[in-house]
Structures are given as C-alpha cells and as structure tokens.
Image: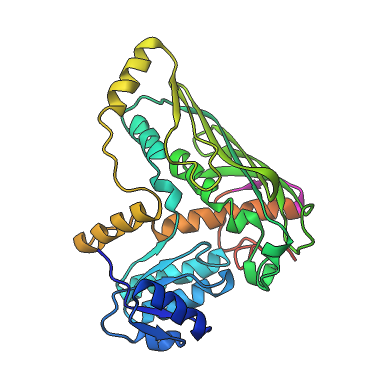
Amino acid sequence: MFEVVAICDLDKDKAREVASQNGIPNVLTDLDVLCGMGDIDVIDVCTPSYLHSEHVLLALAGGKYVVCEKPVAGSLQAVDDLLRAERDAGKRVMPIYQNRFGHGLQKLRLLIDEGLAGKAYLTTVETAWRRRQAYYDVPWRGRWATELGGPLVTLAIHAHDVLTYVIGPAQRVFAHAATRVNPIETEDCLGAVLEMADGSLATLAVTTGSADEISRLRFCFEGLTAESTTAPYACTRDPWRFTADSPEDEQRVAETLGRFDPLPEGFEGQFYRFYHAIQQGSDPPVTLGDARASLELITALYYSVETGEPVPLPIGTDHPRYVSWRPE
C-alpha cells in the first residue's frame, strides 16, 4: 500500500541507522526539502508535540497528505488554523488515534449500530501507566511549552478519544489534577467526571504511577455492558466481554458478532483505511474534526483544574483558553 521513500531527522546518524534497517533510500535533515520532493504523496509527522502544527502546515503547503501524531496542535485556535489550511490545500490531515480500530471496540460499534446497546448510562475510563524519571529526562517531555501537557495530552488522549468516538461529545466536565509521581511541570494524576451530551455520565482516571500498567474501558448501556481487556497499550483489541441484559438479547448479540468482519487493527488498521480513503477521495478514518473534539475536551478539563469549577462545552473562540489550554 505505502512505500517509505525518505526519512527526515535533525540527527542524520540516527536517520541513517533507521533508513539502513528499513531499506529507506533517502535520508534528509531539512523538512522544507522533504516537503518539496515531487515523488512523495504523504508525510508522517512524528516530531515532539510542540512542533506538530508547524510541521503539518509545512507539509500541506507542499501539497502533501499529512499523518500526524497526537496532539495535532497545542490549542483549539491552532487546530482551527490547520482546518483552514487543509481546506486551502485540497489535501487531508489524518491524526493518529489507532485505538479506534481494535476488534473489540469495533464489535461494540457494530452492536450499537445494530441497535442492541440502547441508551448509554455510564462509562468508566482508566489509564494507569508507569513513567519513571528516565522518561522525562528527554528534554521536551514534562514541560508545558514543549510537551503541551502531561498524560492527559500524551497518554490518556487515546482512551478519552475512544470515549467520545463511542458516546459522542461531553457537555460539562469537572476535574482535579496533581503532580505526585515525578518532579515535572505538568500533571501526572487526574480524575474527572463528565456529563455527556446524550445525558450519560463518564469518569476518567489517569496516572503515570501505576506499578501494574492497565488501560480499561467499561460501557454500561440499557441493553448491554461492554468491557475491554486491561492491556495498557492495546485495550481496544479482543477479547472484549459483552453481557446482554436478557437471554434473548444474549442470543441477538451472539448472532450479530458472528457477522463481524475483522479488518486490520491498530496502526495497520488506521493506515489500511487511510489508503482506501485516498484512493476513493473520501474522508480519512480519523479527521482533523475528530482531533479538534479531542483537544476541546482537553481544554475543558485543564480549565476545570485551573478554576476548580465545572466547565461547559463546546468551547468558543471567546473562551479564555481558546488560544492555549496551558494554565497561566
């Protein structure tokens, strides 16, 4: 589907090593040169967080499709700038949210689409990982100016995207955060309660201080309960547990899951869908609009931490944190 023809990094020795290991013919240190290469269709931005929006803009200006790691930008204002640049360029940007494509989660989406779930009641989302000081010895990590936030922005963002991917947007959030695990600028523990737009509730729990690393998603619906595995970096993959509310519903769930068509998962699954979207001229499997929703939730959560108050969504251009979610 895709052929990697160039790698660009400020550390040319490191880039050469990766290129040698993977048979990549071109090694560059200048992003402008990369963006100007005529035989490249897609540029994948994997730079530190604070550089993402700048590099996406350069790639769009070079007429490329763009893939970008999370977070795609450091504010709602910046992601709105990207949306305008995307429209002007006539190309598309695909933010990376690979957890959407695990088979367990996709089975839940199928059950919802088939009308077997009913209205949502409560969702619980846990991201309990371990990050020691060595992780933050990388100079750009753990700093507001360069990592753009703590695990809310760089780790739990995937699980929280799954929440809104399944349930839809939040309409009101209340959060507390603390820095208890490592001596960093940003938070490393967070707890939050969300009122979703559909009226259901959700809780978020995030820490980098869990010796037993887990991720867990649990959805309680009118017709069934769905629970993920606890695999910290692959909790949307099988095996998920689906418990229907009656024997009759159990039979319907089993029959529906028997029709599940497994496409590739994770990164492979996202790129598989991206390839077909490019070929068909359709929307990428994850859009800048999806990323904006993710960053709007982050903005609201940080503002609640800062003010100690519940925060309503959506967040407009007149909001004090539209230009940056970083606390003053």
For the N terminus, which image quadrant?
bottom left
Residue extent of the magenta highlight: 307-312
What is the x, y in percent for residue 94? Answer: 38, 62
Report the residue at 53% width, 83% height from top. 11
Does the magenta portion include 32?
A: no
What is the x, y in percent for residue 211? Answer: 70, 44
User: Could you tell me how many numbered marks the image carries?
Assistant: 0
Q: In the rendered image, is residue 142 in sight?
A: no
For the C terminus, which image quadrant?
bottom right
292 relative position to 125: left or right: left
Does the magenta portion include 309?
A: yes
Q: Quadrant of residue 119?
A: top left
100 relative position to 23: left or right: right
What is the x, y in percent for residue 256? Answer: 29, 26
Q: How is the image coloured?
A: rainbow
Q: Is residue 238 above or below residue 251?
A: below
Q: Is residue 220 above or below residue 197?
A: above
Q: Is residue 76 above or below residue 64?
A: above
Q: In the rendered image, is residue 309 in sight?
A: yes
